[in-house]
Amino acid sequence: MGIFVKFRFMYVLAALVLLGLGISFSVQAQKKPPIQTSPFDLNLTEVGIVTEIIKPDTLRLANGKIFKIDNIRVPLQLDSNAIEFLNNNVLNKKIGFYIVGKDPVERADRFGHTLAHVVTEDGEWVQALMVSRGLAWASGSESSRELFIPLLKYEDLARSQNLGLWKLPTFAIRDNETIHNNTYNSFQVFEGTIRAVSAKGRYAFYNFDKDPKTDFTIVVNIGKMEAYTLSTGAHSYSPLEFVGRKVRIRGWVEENNGPMIELLFQEQLEFLDAPFQIYYK
């Protein structure tokens, strides 16, 4: 396993270089433990030979164990491209698998596949390679979000170069107008300015136009969402004070008085107009 451990310093150095170039996360989470920046901040749980690419995000090892490539989402239209990439880069090769915590059972999805970050024997982070080529979105969930923010920077690179999914009109970032164009029951990325915030019972609603009955809405289950505030250093903002902030969100679009995405975890909402810090309570 030693070869997979020695690359940790390289990733930390790379992160420092990005910061030195002025490339920084629009939102940085302040929580315990500190936010991870690479797979080497996680725990190496398995090293083995990949013998089968089951799906664009699922790998089988020679010992029969199955791992799901965590924190990415591959569009159906790019399945074959992603599989070709994995065939060329991980199939029949020795690969390291890194997980949050130490128990693979606790990191299993509903199919029993372990959610992991994948590193080649050369120290290449497979998720970063796929996202930076536009073969997948960065993605996360309430229970799996540790390396979501670092992957957003690789996604920015792919989008700036119009690579992979980002050159397809189907996957363009949506706004107040285009979010209404055949997006229901699909995964989308949306950008806009929060025009109004309201609360009703257990839910808060972020609206992005004048009519809350038809415009795009972000819905937050206040009872489930961890409490947090934004801060510029001089002033802190609670979630009900986010009016006027330009944001980006990704998720599954549903119909509920117009198109709606539910905010399930804080990092899912990117703040684009100021270098905010997130503080958890």
Image: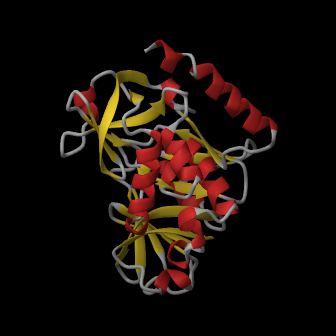
Find residue 21 and report its image quarter: top right
Above/below status of 206 relative to 220: below
At a point 73% along the width and 54% down the height, the residue shown is 274
Q: Is residue 102 above or below residue 203?
A: above
Q: State the residue in front, 76 or 191.
A: 76
Residue at the far top in the pictured view: 2
The answer to which quarter of the image holds residue 177 is: bottom right
Can you give x and y, in whole percent of width and height, for residue 30 in the image?
57, 35
**Colour basis:** secondary structure
Query: Residue at left 47%, top 85%?
Result: 180
In the foreground, 130 or 197: 130
Residue 33 in view (yes/no)? no
Q: In this view of the protein, can residue 200 be seen by the observer? A: yes
Identify which residue, 50 or 250, lies in the foreground. Answer: 50
Report x, y in % for residue 31. 52, 32
At 49% from the left and 54% from the top, the residue drawn is 268
Q: Position of residue 25 (x, y in %)?
A: 66, 45
Residue 280 % position (x, y)? 51, 39
Image-based side of 236 in relation to 96, left or right: right
Left or right of 61 in this view: 179: right
User: Residue at 39% across / 53% down in the picture?
Assistant: 83
